[in-house]
Amino acid sequence: MTERVDPGELRARFARSLSQLYGSEVPAYTTLVEVCEEINAEVLDRPGVDAERFGSIDRVTAERHGAIRVGTAEELGQVARIFGACGMYPVGFYDLREATVPIPVVSCAFRPIEEAELAANPFRVFTSVLVIDDRRFFDERLTDELGEFLAARRLFDDELLELADAAERDGGLSEDRAARFLKLATEAFALSPEPIDRAWYERLEAVSSVAADIGGVRSTHINHLTPRVLDIDALYARMQRRGITMIDAIQGPPRTDKPDVLLRQTSFRALAEPRAFVEPDGSVGTGELRVRFGEVEARGVALTRAGRELYDSGGIDAFPDTDEELDAADLAYYTRVDGALKPIVYEDFLPRSAAGIFASNLSRDTVADAAQRAASRDAAWLAEALGRPLHDPYVLYDVQRGRA
Ligand code: OOG
Ligand code: NI
């Protein structure tokens, strides 16, 4: 029998191959990764600092999250099969339509869900699906036209999906088939050179840049790929010094002397990338679009529901100062290893930061009419579209803690 490339190895290779692709497409990403590695090495050398408190340096160095956006339930189901091959399962329900700056999508994260798999390679992909029938954003005519446009495109070809199904069914692929799967999967997320119908794109863009990015083109692409850094404040300053303009702030909890909780993120503005357009008169010209950007993140301990409620009510100041107190008050997740408390890393996303990241990179705001009817989308709808269970992050952390 030939050696199989198992889902964990497929995931690690997929993350590397997307990283190579994104580096070739967005050069500032490569700078960001270099600066992250510099800073991580410095933090590792700081005396008295437990740099590996939130995961081994090998895990952190390889760690990436990506973001993709699709248009239909069917496309989402296909994405679930591709990630399923890599041992990445849907977790969490995020409704970004409810954000301060509403975005017409609902989302989940695909990621490994077992401790050993997370430690080996925690690659995760924030995946959003457009809500085309939400009247606050799209009128009936635009809903119909979007539906038709999306139904006529094919993001993933049959060979890729069949390889994905085989990998999931058989617990991996032979070397040859793994290489083929990774090639096709990576290509599916590359920026397409196909000319964009300018009039159609601009009609959608008048409603929402995200709607245009998703439904204005016949392909999908990786929107950003995010490395992990151990000191995000130092990184922010160093990127600025290197001449890369960052967004105004670091999203998520402020810097404190308390244990790091949840997730802090920042990004650099979307870059103008040349794209081909079909003009209304039928001629093909070039233009540029700013849709893809670079983001970086630092991760802390996962909060329990109670901890999260406290955080959401604005209470970082109300958090205790030590791991022991956070654990005793059941505000954050820890395991006990040889008598010592070990934080369980937050593996998910924050809707407020996600909306902030979306918004800070849009060329213009979403136009929403709050008086119109919302389309109903919830975790059950998402699970149905995915064709598989949608995991509740708290249940996963409870299991990891072993005190469910
Ligand atoms: C996703 C934005 C959310 C994050 O890190 O919070 C995200 C997108 O831009 O498609 O990636
Ligand atoms: Ni992101």
Image (cartoon, rainbow, N blue to C red):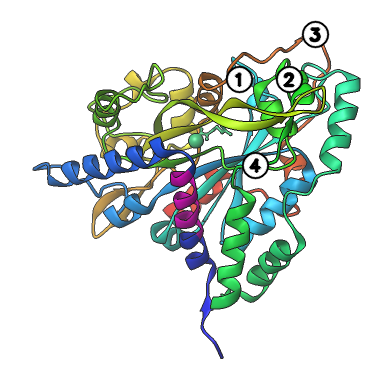
Q: Is residue 366 above or below residue 155?
A: above
Give the SS element for disc 1: loop
Callout 1: 10 Å neighbours few (<14), some, many (20+)? some
Q: Mark on residue 371?
A: 3
Q: Mark on residue 193?
A: 4
3D distance between C-alphas at marks 2 and 4: 18 Å
Q: Which of pointers 1 and 2 indicates the residue nearer the eye?
A: 2
Q: Is mark 4 within 8 Å of ligand 1?
A: no
Question: Which residue shows up at 66% across the image and 26% down it?
Answer: 210
Mark with earlier residue (3, 1) = 1
- The answer to which image quadrant residue 258 occupies is top left
Magenta region: 14-24
Question: Which residue shows up at 45% across the image and 50% down it?
Answer: 19
In percent of width and height, residue 67 lies at 56, 40
Callout 2: 10 Å neighbours few (<14), some, many (20+)? some
Residue nearer the viewer, 45 or 36:
36
Residue located beneath label 1 in the image: 99
- The answer to which image quadrant residue 227 occupies is top left
In percent of width and height, residue 216 lies at 74, 31
Q: Is residue 128 visible?
A: yes
Residue located beneath label 2 in the image: 202
